[in-house]
């Protein structure tokens, strides 16, 4: 009985202490701000480092950067602001709330950190998608697209272009998954338009069109798998759709089923460079959509 009472007392004491700490954080933040305004930067940093509430994390790290700038520790200030950008890549500081110096530094840090932040958002959204959390996935892919849009034209690398295409495609897939259950059970989907019909002809042909000679592979290298250390005993597979134009070049490529997030960007980039002899219909080259299943066996890649 004594042991039970003691345990209960300790549990209550822990809850009370935790509540007290949470209540103390706003006071500590106010104290840290006051110390910063009085140029007591080291003391302010000590107060800020003792604050643990996630709600104040952005303000805390921004004031840490202010204090570090006051101490001449520019690189440490940049690292503090990088944390803010990682958590909220769309956040913008203004001169009304912060000094012009920290606003300018934040702008520079944000410019450098946005590409990595976009990739993190994409990977997190992909995890949500693979775990069938489609609402969260759709929101994550859209946020990744917003972040990519914030990156200036001079920083739009090939990787970001691929990331934008992936995010856009998966956002559409996630929204389709969200909408699918809302359809009435008795509803019958409208039949898809038949490929190969119509006065003007289809936008492209597929294997369903028996009067079309499919394209012939000229160059279609599958990128090497360099991630064997992460999952050496797991098989990976995915599905690509490539639209091949009348010259045998890949016009568009869509990853309809992912292989693995770190590998997907490499695969998409490689697929855009594939070459074919174009599909032929009645002696003329035509556009053709191919579906490819990508299978990866890491154990064979190692040999």
Image (cartoon, rainbow, N blue to C red):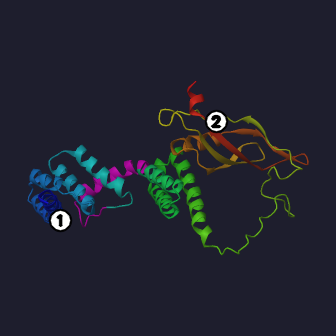
What residue is rendered at 10% in x and 50% in y?
42
Instruction: Compute the Cα span from label 1 to label 2.
Output: 56 Å
Q: Are marks 1 and 2 in contact (CB under 8 Å)?
A: no
What residue is rendered at 11% in x and 62% in y?
31
| Residue 272 appears in view | no
Disc 1: which residue: 19
What residue is rendered at 56% in x and 48% in y?
162
Q: Position of residue 239 (x, y in %)?
A: 65, 47
Q: Position of residue 249 (x, y in %)?
A: 72, 43
Residue 226 sits inside the magenta stretch: no
Residue 102 sits inside the magenta stretch: yes
**Image quarter in which the C terminus is found:** top right
- The residue furthest front is 1
Magenta residues, start to end: 93-116
Q: Position of residue 196 (x, y in %)?
A: 84, 58
Q: Position of residue 28 (x, y in %)?
A: 13, 62
**Image quarter in which the N terminus is found:** bottom left
134 over 259 or under it: above or below: below
User: At numbered mark 2, what does the secondary structure look like: helix, strand or loop?
Assistant: loop
State left or right for residue 251 relative to residue 144: right
The crowd level at tag 2 (other Cα within 10 Å; few <14, some 14-19, many 20+) is some
State left or right for residue 261 relative to residue 28: right
Which quadrant holds residue 222?
top right
State left or right for residue 36 relative to residue 154: left
Disc 2: which residue: 222
State left or right for residue 77 relative to residue 265: left
221 over 243 or under it: above or below: above
225 over 28 or under it: above or below: above
> Considering only order in the chain, which callout, 2 or 1, is on the residue closer to the N terminus?
1
């Amino acid at each position: 009985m004594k042991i039970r009472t003691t345990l209960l007392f300790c549990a209550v004491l822990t809850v009370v202490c935790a509540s007290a700490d949470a209540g103390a954080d706003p006071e500590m933040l106010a104290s840290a701000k006051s110390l910063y305004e009085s140029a007591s930067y080291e003391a302010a940093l000590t107060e800020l480092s003792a604050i643990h509430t996630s709600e104040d994390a952005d303000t805390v790290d921004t004031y840490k950067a202010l204090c570090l700038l006051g101490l001449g520790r520019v690189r440490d200030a940049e690292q503090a602001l990088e944390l803010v950008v990682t958590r909220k890549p769309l956040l913008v500081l203004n001169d009304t709330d912060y000094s012009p110096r920290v606003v300018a530094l934040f702008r520079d840090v944000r410019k450098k950190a946005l590409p990595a932040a976009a990739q993190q958002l994409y990977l997190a959204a992909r995890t949500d998608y693979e775990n069938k959390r489609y609402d969260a996935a759709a929101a994550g892919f859209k946020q990744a697209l917003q972040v990519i849009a914030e990156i200036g034209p001079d920083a739009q690398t090939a990787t970001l272009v691929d990331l934008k295409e992936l995010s856009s495609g998966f956002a559409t897939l996630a929204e389709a998954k969200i909408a699918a259950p809302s359809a009435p059970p008795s509803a019958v989907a409208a039949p898809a338009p038949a490929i190969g019909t119509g006065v003007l002809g289809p936008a492209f042909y597929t294997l369903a069109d028996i009067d079309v000679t499919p394209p012939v592979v000229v160059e279609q290298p599958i990128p090497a798998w360099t991630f064997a250390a992460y999952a050496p005993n797991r098989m990976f597979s995915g599905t690509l759709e490539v639209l091949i134009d009348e010259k045998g070049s890949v016009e568009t490529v869509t990853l309809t089923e992912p292989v693995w997030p770190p590998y997907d960007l490499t695969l998409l980039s490689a697929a855009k460079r594939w070459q074919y002899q174009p599909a032929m219909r009645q002696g003329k080259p035509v556009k053709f959509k191919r579906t490819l299943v990508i299978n990866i066996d890491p154990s064979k890649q190692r040999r």
